[in-house]
Amino acid sequence: MNAIRFEQETDGSFYRVAKQRVNDLFTRTGKSRLADRSILWKAAFYFAVLIGSYTLVLVHPFPNWTLLPLAFVYGLTALLLVINVGHEAAHETLFRSKFWNNVVLALSFAPIGLSGYLWKMRHTKSHHLFPNVNGCDSDIDENPFLRLSPNHAWRPHFRYQHLYAPLIYLIVGVHSLLWQEFGYLFKKQLANMTNIKHPLPQYLVFALTKAFHFGAALVVPLLVLPLPWWQVVLGYLAMTCVGSLAFVALLGPSHYSDLAEFPVVATDGSIGHTWSIHNMVTTCDWSPYSPVALFISGGFNTHSSHHLFPKISHAHYPAIARIVEDTAAECGVRYNRKSSLGAIGSHFRFLRNMGRKPERPVTGCIDAQLPSHLP
């Protein structure tokens, strides 16, 4: 079994020039790679909105019709807390301490009922190593509903996937919560990861996270709110669906774009380009210099910068994105960029393109070990 092999970075290459300029930026400004006060204030803001909206739902001082909008605020804020804070903790860019990063990781994911530990495992040990590589990136595992890579098998119903995809996206949250995560917990092999073993305490944390989520989001409202049980359950499902759509809208276009490539690994393990070029061609930025986009997306709008420099907090990504874009232009490297609305359109064009029957049978990816070279 051949390990995936990226080409070597050379002196004066795009990545080495960009990395030196990023290092110079931190030397010149005296800033740390870790999160600054802006991230801490943002975390405090989202946490305050989360607690405030939840309290208003339970106390319900307003007419009952306001309960559903408040539930939407709670669900969306819980998602934004994960994207802006949990994601930072997963990459250990909040604190120098791995322990406190893991504590925040677990706590930030708890309101949505998912395991921060499992998400970090997939995100850092699979997706970030082999983005958009079939069989090697757990984020593009094949499924019977959507074709998310040109290297996946085609089925006739995929030709309509750009039309029915929003309906699938509505249940992403429930599917992850009740089905997908259990698979991740008990699978011994997932994409490039083999012989997977989890620390025993993580099984307990997994159970407590599920219990906390369903207790806070469903059981307590059922006991407290003056509504029929079925209305509370429908409200919970509606909240989860809205959160699912927001999740796909914020994260999906970063890789599932008609600009992004899905490289195929050769039989000898070569992928045909360097690690940095791989991350440039498989990502797509959207509104990378917008403070609003940064505040909401936690840096997913500057996704090429994140993949090139995952150990740097997203607080610094607007400046880094400028370096990446300018260096790419100087070195003749493609830089994928869209507006916020353009990214959504790009995503649905991607779905339509993937739904077309390929002219020849697709080929998959070889089984992957760790790449033989990473910068």
Image (tube, rainbow, N blue to C red):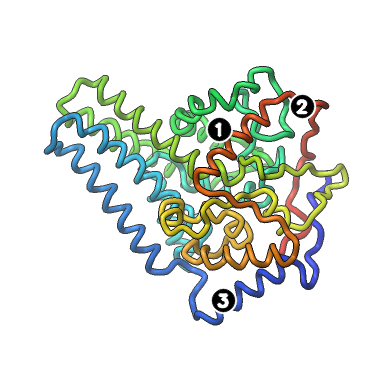
Distance between the alpha carbons at the discs numbered 2 and 3: 45 Å
Label 2 belongs to which residue? Answer: 358
For mark 1, what is the residue?
183
- Residue 85 visible to an observer of this rendering: no
Q: Nearer the viewer, residue 67 or 116?
A: 67
Whole-angstrom CA distance, mark 1 to mark 2, is: 30 Å
Report the residue at 34% width, 46% height from top.
77
Secondary structure at badge 3 equals: helix
Structural crowding at the residue carrying mark 3, measured as other residues with C-alpha within 10 Å and reported as few (<14), some (14–19) or many (≥20): some
Tell me the number on the disc at residue 292: none
Which of the 4 image quarters holds residue 56?
top left
User: Which amino acid is tagged 3?
Assistant: Leu
Q: Is residue 13 left or right of residue 31?
A: right
Quadrant including the C terminus = bottom right
Disc with the residue nearer the chain's start (2 vs 3): 3
Seen in the picture, residue 160 relative to 7 is either above or below; the reply is above
Dot 2 alpha-carbon crowd within 10 angstroms: few under 14, some 14 to 19, many 20 or more: few
Instruction: Name the amino acid, label 1.
Output: Gly
The 10 Å Cα crowd at callout 1, few under 14, some 14 to 19, many 20 or more, is: few
The mark lying in front, picked from 1 and 2, is: 2
> Residue 334: image x %, image y %?
71, 55
Which residue in the protein does label 3 denote? 25
Q: Residue 272 at what x, y percent from top left? A: 82, 51
Q: Earlier in the sequence, mark 1 or mark 2?
A: 1
